[in-house]
Amino acid sequence: MAGRGPRPKDPDRRARGNRDPVPQTVLRFERADPPDLPDDVDWHPRTQEWWAMWRRSAQADTFTETDWSFLMDTALMHHAMWSKGQWTLAAEVRLRVAKYGATPEDRARLRMVFADADEKDEKRGARPATGARERHGVLKALPSPAASGE
């Protein structure tokens, strides 16, 4: 006996194949060491702290040379905000650091998780397995109203 229902549609004729129409380009990863801020700028102390934070961040382990270059441009905007009061740059800085996973929301959108999350999940699942009887005790079935003649 064959399967039930109509024959499946030819995959080439489906409207949605859930496959990426553009193939991925696989690149060789070359980690770049975090650069120092250039000496030709008298950096605002807040920008120096901000840069040091990014250098220490977990995300920094995945940065390439182009990532650091983009972040350096962002540091110049950050410096202009704090030293010259150019707060109109704040929105651009926020958008730029979001690309690097600056906030928990950014990391969630980028599907970034910290390695300790795996450890926490393992600990959470390490509870002793209990069956339904241990959780609920002995359950008794009640007679249905139809069986009792009501």
Image (tube, rainbow, N blue to C red):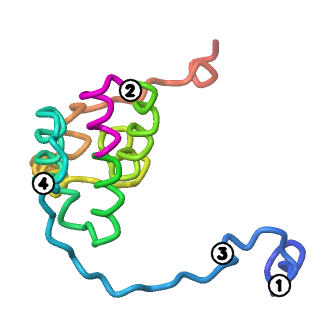
- Disc 3 crowd, CA 10 A, few/some/many (<14, 14-19, 20+): few
Badges 4 and 2: C-beta atoms under 8 Å apart? no
Mark 4: which secondary structure? loop
Residue nearer the viewer, 117 or 24? 24
Q: Give the amino acid at mark 2.
A: Gln
Mark 1 to mark 3 CA distance (whole Å): 12 Å
> Who's the residue at 44% across and 85% down the image?
26
> Three-letter amino acid code at disc 1?
Asp
**In x, y percent, where is residue 49?**
11, 39
Nearer the N terminus, badge 4 or badge 3?
A: 3
Element type at mark 2: loop
Residue 132, position in %: x, y? 26, 41
Q: Residue at x 81, y 86 (%)?
A: 2
Q: Is residue 17 left or right of residue 58?
A: right
| Within-10-Å neighbours for mark 4: few <14, some 14–19, many 20+ | few
Which residue appears at 38% of the width and 43% of the height?
106
The circle drawn on residue 12 is 1
In the rendered view, tell whether residue 94 sits above or below residue 4: above
Q: Is residue 72 visible?
A: yes
Report which residue position mark 2 lands on. Answer: 86
Q: Which residues are magenta?
A: 76-86
Question: Residue 116: x, y in percent?
Answer: 13, 53
